Amino acid sequence: MELDITLAREFYRQMLLIRRFEEKCVELYSNQKIRGFLHLYIGEEAIATGVMQALGADDSVLSTYREHGHALARGIPAKRIMAEMYGKVEGCSRGRGGSMHLFDAETRFYGGSAIVGGGLPLAIGMALADKMMKRDRVTVAFFGDGAVAEGAFHESMNLAALWQLPVLFVCENNRYAMGTALELTESETNLANKAAAYKIVSRQVDGMDVVAVAEAAEEAIAEVRAAKRPLFLECLTYRFRAHSMFDAELYREKTEVAEWKQKDPLAVLKMRAETAGLWAQLNADELEEEVSAIVDEAVAFAENGTLESLSDLEKFVYSEEAAQ
Ligand SMILES: Cc1ncc(C[n+]2csc(CCOP(=O)(O)OP(=O)(O)O)c2C)c(N)n1
């Protein structure tokens, strides 16, 4: 992939938006504007950015509870995501889902999920439907390293291979499942090997380098679409922040976090742009301003949004038809 100025700017802008959006979320959470759980993607931005640019509008996406980055990169407007965080009806899930349950049928973003590995069986169902209906779609399922310990992971791998389903599995291996290091729960820590055991073509990529992820994702999605079979992409990454807002991080050394911060995806892209002689032209200051305006607008939109009225609280529990 040739890193030209258009691509470099777009990647940088996208990752910066995710970073600044989430930094604002931390502030709002501390001020109790956002309630419930909040899991930050900071450090992992290269994955959502790199994978999403390789998808077409008709492809489907399933995500996890750490999904703000996926949702933004897929194109859900920041203000609809922020309103969702605030629990306002203008939110992408009508304020009923919050941070962990972003959903937007228009961009075919079929949800964050609070259940570890919960998106995997859904991806299988969606891809099976596409196969049966002879639609030329790819389904992408994002999940963490913790999900490979779930039965749902193994059932999904098995069925995807057996039925030759067009799914790209994107494993975001950030080395920890909450407070548990991968090597304490898995005898095989090369997760691509686990998928390979199900006869699924699998690869590993540097998840801190957006260009590497974008290249791997483009190739992978083209293969899934052409060969109509699954593919597994393990992205080696790290989360810079705590698991969620309640986590004293007693399970890892500060030095380890500092070491990974040397590979900050924004810094890696900056280095690449400098090498290609594109950095000055990229105009990072202008992008900071642009992104800051988007985040401010999102907060204002959420602040001015409407809370669901009490009389509507039971709405959508049953379909309108069934409720009659
Ligand atoms: C089925 C299920 N089991 C346990 C939990 C509790 N839990 C929430 S997050 C988490 C760790 C998951 O880690 P990983 O999949 O690596 O994702 P990451 O948080 O690192 O992005 C666990 C065990 C849950 N939400 N769902």
Image: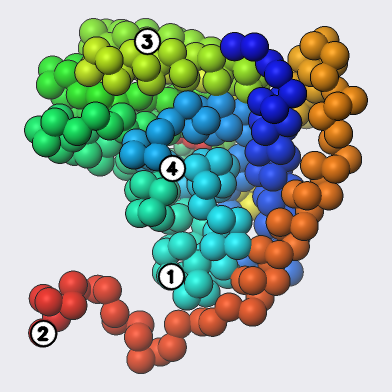
Q: Quadrant of the N terminus?
A: top right
Q: Secondary structure at mark 3?
A: strand
Residue named by callout 4: 64
Q: Amino acid at mark 1?
A: Arg
Most foreground residue, 60 or 28: 60
Q: Is residue 256 visible?
A: no
Q: Are marks 3 and 4 in contact (CB under 8 Å)?
A: no
Ligand 1: does it lie within 8 Å of the C-beta at label 4?
yes
Q: Position of residue 259 (x, y in %)?
A: 77, 19
The Cα–Cα distance between marks 3 and 4, rounded to whole angstroms, is 21 Å
Most foreground residue, 78 or 21: 78
The Cα–Cα distance between marks 1 and 3, rounded to whole angstroms, is 37 Å
- Return the disc, 2 or 3, that comes first in the chain's sequence: 3
Q: Is residue 75 visible?
A: yes
Residue named by callout 3: 202
> How many neighbours does mark 1 have within 10 angstroms: few (below 14), some (14-19), or many (20 or more)?
some
Q: Quadrant of ligand 1?
A: top left
- Return the disc, 2 or 4, that comes first in the chain's sequence: 4
